Image (cartoon, rainbow, N blue to C red):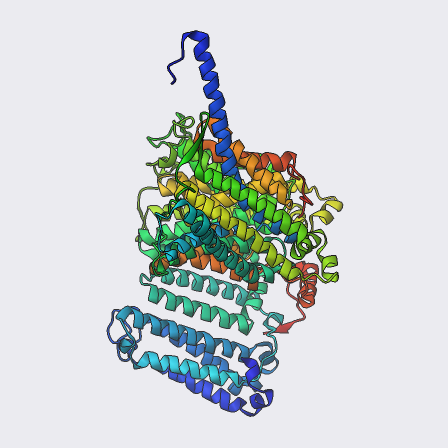
Amino acid sequence: MPALAVGTDGSARVKKALDVELFFQQLINGLSLGALYALIAVGYTVVYGIVQLINFAHGEIFMIGAFGSFATWVIVGKPTDWGLGMTLGVLLPVMLLGGIAASVTVAVMMERFAYRPLRGAPRLAPLISAIGVSVFLQEAVRLFFGWIPGMPDAKSAIPYPTLTGVSDGSIQIGGVTVQASAIFTLVALAVCTVFLWYFVNRTKTGRAMIATSQDPDTARLMGINVDRVIVAAFAVGAALAAVAGVAHGLRYGNIDFRMGFLAGLKAFTAAVLGGIGNIYGAVVGGLVLGVTEALASNYLGTTAWKDVWAFILLILVLVFRPQGLLGSKAVDRA
Amino acid sequence: MNAIIPSEHKIRFRFVGRGTGITAAVLMIASIMLPWAYTGAALDDVSYWASPSPLQIYFAILAGLLLVLLAVPLVGKERLGKYAKLVAWNSAAKVAAVTSTVMAAVALISIALELGGLINVMIGAWLALGGAVLSIIATRYLPDSPEPRLEDVASPRWLQILAVAVIMAAGLFAAATALGYDDAGSFLTFAAFLAGVILVLKSFGFFDWLSIAGAANNRVLVLSAFAVAFAFPFTQNGSDANMSIASQVLIFAATALGLNIVVGLVGLLDLGYIAFLGAGAFTAAILSESAYSTVNWHPPFIVTVLISGTVAATLGLIIGAPTLRVSGDYLAIVTLAFGEIFRITMINLDGNDGPNLTHGSNGIPAIPDLNFLGFDFGVSHVILGVDIGRFANYYWLMLILLAIIIVVFTNLNHSRIGRGWVAIREDELAAEAMGVNTFLLKLLAFAGGAFLAGLAGAVKAHHDVSVTPDQYIFLESAFLLSAVVLGGMGTVLGVLIGATILKLLPEKLRFFSDYRLLAFGLLMVIMMRFRPEGIIADRRRALEFHDKNEELAEEVEEELITHHAHLNPDPKGFEL
């Protein structure tokens, strides 16, 4: 409590200033958390937009990305004292690439073996298959990650490395503390959104994706290889999820084989909130969800309830605005 | 594998094949007179000369089946006349050869693993396996049999009832024996034997006939099944461990049947179903006379169980009413979110983050045993000289509850409501256009399924003694779902089998417990890929998964038209 609080109206003014600071603090926390959700949510939305499938195992792809980047860090030699330049220029990109390689590989294999054979089956079938994949991937990491030479046992949480300038230290703006990892997450989201915009609107594969999502049969007639487009959608989603995985590790300082479940569920909420099938909707939805969660945990009951608020938000959106904030293609599919 | 042998070879070598197969079967039967293992520590002691253990006798039964299937057409084809054509002798023999090989291999591997090395496997086991492999090769040279048409045989009533009774007794014997094995090797060998006999009988055409015999004597079938299940505790000699597994299986099966209404009949994927079981359990725990109960009202159990069901059904309405309008995948995620909301809320109602109702993650322990009209469930009784322990009491209670649920399920399934549900599952838009009130029917299924889970939860609270939020995680919902999927969506028998497999296997295969979830995830993917309709397929449901299969479509159509005719078998059919 600052010492300048003198008299009744003075302390009220200080309290108000603190309230404003607290609000902005929660806003920043919420935005960085929301950026994490947004990065994962893009994966749900891209896949849904093209094959109308909720890739229930996408949370696990995010987890694999985190473990992949961790494994890369171990392979590089567990560096902890590289300078800022080396960390930003070499270590971080290498870890990101390692994570992306792991998650994209798993996602493409998953599409090939679990989802592609079920295309055209009743909608229950791929969803149940996805639950199976999700449980399988969690268990595979839990049981077998430690078997890889040099890797720690993954049956409990693994401490994630602290990177110089990326996840240690913070910036003070007024009374608001911004963690370095939060800045990393927000920057990553901005870069990924720009990349995504470019990819979807300017590349051939991206435009094929738009065409396929609008009308897969006509797209096929126009000479688009729909199978390849679907694989590309899974790969793009997985790459962004891997970035989110790195961000998660830097933010919380540890990774866990179970981390994908709740994060995946929240990210799905974000995708629905923004309008599933709409890529920018996923970004907006993620940010809105993060801020809502942070503010709700501050103003509505204790932090123990924050997940409950997120899910209630999901239900409310589905009831009152099923097309999401930015609108989506179609919602009421049986 | 059939394609490897050209058909002209099958004609030319058919007597050679049959003769070799019979020799192989005789060798297999003879092998049980030889020791299979060096010491008696594996597979309930198979180390004696000329003194076969039960497991070896089971192997001989399987081999004997093979012998009969190969020998009868040779000696009796003329005498059997037209009946000989109704049975798929050769197909059944091929299946018998393969399954006895599997059984011999499982036994051999078990002996090797339990005694530490192949050196401990004695001549008998090698002879058994060798004979079985030889019989596979031999039966490959038999010509293919036509599809079995045993169901065309019109048999006298007494024979049908006898068959049903024998099958039920065999089921009781199999369940009691399977539960009785403590080591994984014996259990797996016995399971291989059971699967072998079932598969042989299936390819023989026996189950097609039995299902018609059963349908014609529906009441006998249901009553005898219930009687057998009721008699089960008497086979266990007061073993609380086995009865605990059995009563857990029943609780799980009852919950899975409730989920089966929602998923199997209406086609709504509910991923938070465990929350309704939890709601029932927590309600019953809070209203029980536990010292940790947070409410000062302790009604008798008959009231509690109804309140538990009602609470669960109300939750179902609250979650269903707004979300059932958005269909399909969205519902799955909303119910999943609801399951998480329930769990987190139960953790948070601990007095710190909310009012104290559940003691947070500690839950409510020390729930007293049920006391029903003066009958204390916690006390052992001696009936007919057999000790009937605490879990047997709960087993019987759950059995009654399960019977009620099955009656409700089958009656609903054949009612106007059930037809409306199936119509929604197959095509919601078309159903709505036909005047089916889809929203109300979906809500009814959702709330009804929740009510049943609430009832089961109320018993579970007393059975488990304590209720904690961590029993009601998403994985449990996934397990329930996989019991439904594995067994066969929309069927009663399938879900009972699925629930039994999923609860029994982890109890008996402890060494496997670390890989249990991995196998479970893989199983779900493989099932969806190769047999999405489950072990026991509801034919109509199967058609939805294989909509290109014209033959199946015609069969289902015929079945629907002649559904009632099947209840009265054609009098013009063959007389046996």
Question: Residue at 50% across / 88% down in the picture?
Answer: B17
Give the camera-side residue of B378 and A39: A39
- Residue B114: horizontal and vertical position, in percent? 29, 68
Based on the displayed image, in which of its 4 quarters is residue B576 positioned?
bottom right
Looking at this view, name the residue that lies furthest to the left. Answer: B39
Left or right placement of residue A222 versus residue A56 in this view: right
Question: Residue at 39% across / 17% down in the picture?
Answer: A2
**Residue B315 shows in this picture:** no
- Residue B129: horizontal and vertical position, in percent? 38, 79
Looking at this view, name the residue that lies furthest to the top. Answer: A7
Give the camera-side residue of B78 and B330: B330
Quarter that holds the N terminus of chain A: top left
**Residue A86 shows in this picture:** yes
- Residue A164: horizontal and vertical position, in percent? 39, 43
**Residue A90 vertical placement versus A281 (above, below):** below
Give the camera-side residue of B356 and A143: A143
Based on the displayed image, in which of its 4 quarters is residue B12 positioned?
bottom right
- Residue B253: horizontal and vertical position, in percent? 47, 50
How many tags in the picture? Answer: 0
Question: Residue at 47% across / 64% down in the picture?
Answer: B167
**Residue B125 vertical placement versus A257 (above, below):** below
